[in-house]
Every structure is written in C-alpha cells, then in structure tokens.
Image: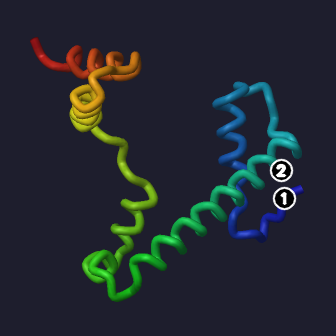
Amino acid sequence: MTDQQHPITPPLELLQQWAFEYWGPQEPVGEGETYIATQAARWGADQQLEQDAKWLDTNALFSHNLTISPSGDALRQKMRPKPPSLKELNLKHLEVMERDGHYLPEIIADLRRALESLPD
C-alpha cells in the first residue's frame, strides 16, 4: 500500500489515467501497479535531487547561472535539456563523417529524415 502522506506519491487519478492509456478502460489499478508506480516516482525524484545537488555544488550561489536566473531557469535547462534539433543533430553527424571518414546506419536515417523534411 502506498503512503499518501509522502510528498512523492502519484495521485490515484494519474495512476488510473496511465492504466487506461496502457490497458484500456477494462483494467482497474491494482495494489501492485500502484506500489511499483510510486516506487518508480520516488526513485526518479531521488535521482533528480542528486543531479540537482551536484549542479548546485558546481554552480554556487555566486555563479552567473544563478544570479541571472532567480526563477531556476538555468537549473531547469540543465536538468531537462531540449533534444537537439534535426539541423543540429545532422550537423554533428556531418562533423563525425568528415572526421572519421565513415558513417553509421542511424546517421543515414537521420540525414534522410532531415532531407525529407525540407520543402521541394
């Protein structure tokens, strides 16, 4: 059974939404699923807290990162970086191809996706 007083406890409504998205409307949320989801949420929060603490240790309160961003934007950007754009990804691929003289199938797939996204 989950401890509803713990600050990291997914609300039952969210667990029901996840169960509906995965199994459909027929399956209720069981104790096992609730326990696993709660433990996973807590584990993820602990991992995030550890990364936040490391970031803060390296970017102390007098750091430029924190003084220009009192709302926590610098920390948020570091902990939840946006994936590279298709352009950025493929420019990196090209650098690797130029440097190493070879390429991997996933590089070709990304380049193809980028080229197909261009207008004719």
The residue at 16%/19% (across/down) is 118
Q: Residue 108 falls in which quadrant of the image?
A: top left
How many other residues sit within 10 Å of disc 2, few (<14), some (14-19) or many (≥20)? some
Pick out the residue farthest to the front.
Answer: 100
Whether tag 1 and tag 2 are in contact, CB under 8 A, the answer is: yes
Q: Earlier in the sequence, mark 1 or mark 2?
A: 1
The residue at 66%/64% (across/down) is 46
Q: Residue 115 falls in which quadrant of the image?
A: top left
Residue type indicated by callout 1: Thr
The residue to which callout 1 is attached is 2
Q: Nearer the viewer, residue 101 or 104?
A: 101
The residue at 27%/20% (across/down) is 111
Q: Nearer the viewer, residue 85 or 72?
A: 85
How many other residues sit within 10 Å of disc 1, few (<14), some (14-19) or many (≥20)? some
Q: Is residue 17 above or below residue 37?
A: above
The residue to which callout 2 is attached is 35
The residue at 39%/86% (across/down) is 61
Residue type indicated by callout 2: Tyr
Q: CA distance from mark 1 to mark 2?
A: 6 Å
Q: Is residue 119 above or below residue 91?
A: above
Pick out the residue farthest to the top.
Answer: 120
Q: Is residue 53 left or right of residue 34?
A: left
| Quadrant of image for the C terminus | top left
- Tell me if residue 57 can be seen: yes
Relative image position of residue 34 (x, y in whole percent): 80, 47
